[in-house]
Structure formats: structure tokens, C-alpha cells
Amino acid sequence: MTRESEFSGEGSKSGLSIGQMSELAGISQRMLRHWEEEGLIYPIRGLSNYRQYMQDDVARLERIVTYREMGFNARQMKALLDCKTPLALDELQKQRSRIEEKIQHLRKAADRLDRLIALAEGKSGNDSAPTKIDQEDRYFSEAYERWGASRQWLEYAERKASRSEQEQKKDMTRLKDVESELAQAKRKGLATTSDKVLELIDEHRQALSWFHVTPSMHVILF
């Protein structure tokens, strides 16, 4: 937008119409009306009640567009447009901090997406000790060959990508603990229909945290 050159043409005496202002600023007429409703810009009304934007409006709109590109909402922009530099600096610094937080959040989201894509493509991304990698990668490859095209595999990838290594170790510990209790119940000779064993079986189903395991699926796995 170059307000001095663009404003010097036709319509400069009576101001710019909303259509001309929209074209000049690259802003939709709907957005111009919205900003007017929010009290950000104040076009005058001509004899036919049409909006007329003067040079001051063009200059103000340039500032509005700048602040919008920096992520400020209408309330924040209105305060910035009408305050002095020291107060504006405080709000600008706060916005800088808010943007940095969003950047960090997006970086984490991008990392999770990378892990999810890799897992969905059948890449384990294992960073354990070398001997452990070979074994776990073999299991992973075999599982991918069998179920890589299934909905459950994508769900597994989603869950694995969203959980830290510590959380995954905790999941495995929980599963092993339940399996140990089931083995102990078997050694004690508890009936498979007893309340204790049925409770342990359901705990085992829930401990299979790689994807949602229904009772019918658990019967096949178990």
C-alpha cells in the first residue's frame, strides 16, 4: 500500500470508497466493515451515507494490517493504535513472548508428526543399545509386515509418537506386572472364571496400550 501516490488520484477530494480502499489495502470489504464495528477505523459517511476513507484512514489501516500480521486481535490492536510508545512496547514484548511459546509448541508438534510419519511408514526410530535395537527392530519389522496396513497400526503409531520413552517404559512395566500376577494366579490354581482372574484379564487388556483392544480382540490375542 502506498498511500501518498494511490490517494492522489480520482476520488481524493471525497475520499476512497470501500471498494477502492479494499483494492488499495488488499483487505476484503467484509473485514473493513468488521474493523469498523470493532472501532479500529472510522470512515466518514457521505451525502448518500456511503463510507469514505480519507488519508488518515489509509495511514491507520496500514498500522492495523501490520499489527494483524503480528498476531494481535482487534482489542489489542485498538489499544496499540491509541497509546504512546512506552505502553505499546510493553504489549509488543508480551506478544513476542506469546509468539515464542507458539513457536515452541509448533516445533514439538512437528517433532511428533515426524515420529508418527516414520512409525506409520514402518520405521522404528529405535535409539536403544545396539544389541537391543536388533531384537526390537526385528519384532517391529515383523509386526509392520503383518499389520502395517491396518487401522490399529496407525493407532499404535499415534500413541507411540505421543508418549515419551519414560512413559513407554512405564507402560511395559505395568503390562509385565499384570502378566506376572496372571502367572501367579495360574500357579495357585485359580479358576479362569473367578472374580480375581477375570479382573486380572481385564487389567491385561487395558495394559495393552499400543492401541484400543476390545474384549473380543483380547480373546484372540490372549
Image (cartoon, rainbow, N blue to C red):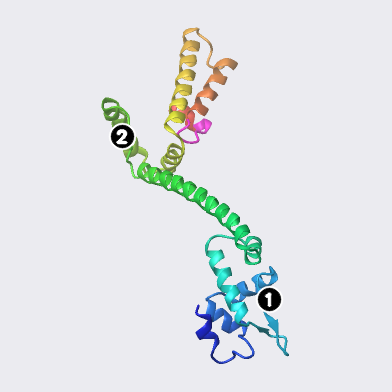
Q: Which mark's residue is nearer the viewer, 2 or 1?
A: 1
Q: Secondary structure at mark 2?
A: helix
Disc 2 residue type? Glu
What numbered label is drawn on residue 142?
2
Q: Residue at x 60, y 62 (%)?
A: 85
Q: Is 134 placed above or below 13 here?
A: above
Mark 2 vs 1, N-terminal side: 1
In the picture shown, does residue 49 fall above or below 78?
A: below
Q: Residue at x 63, y 60 (%)?
A: 76
The residue depicted at 37 percent of the width and 44 percent of the height is 120
In the picture of the structure, the residue carrying the numbered disc 1 is 42
Looking at this view, is 27 or 160 the one in front? 27
Looking at the image, residue 155 lies above or below residue 43? above
Question: What residue range appears in magenta?
Answer: 209-216
Q: Position of residue 142 (x, y in %)?
A: 31, 34
Neighbor class of circle 2 (other Cα within 10 Å; few <14, some 14-19, many 20+) is few
Residue 150 drawn at (x, y percent): 41, 43
Mark 1 crowd level (few <14, some 14–19, many ≥20, 10 Å Cα): some
Camera-side residue of 148 and 19: 19
Q: Position of residue 98 (x, y in %)?
A: 55, 51
The amino acid beneath tag 1 is Tyr
- Quadrant for the C terminus, please: top left
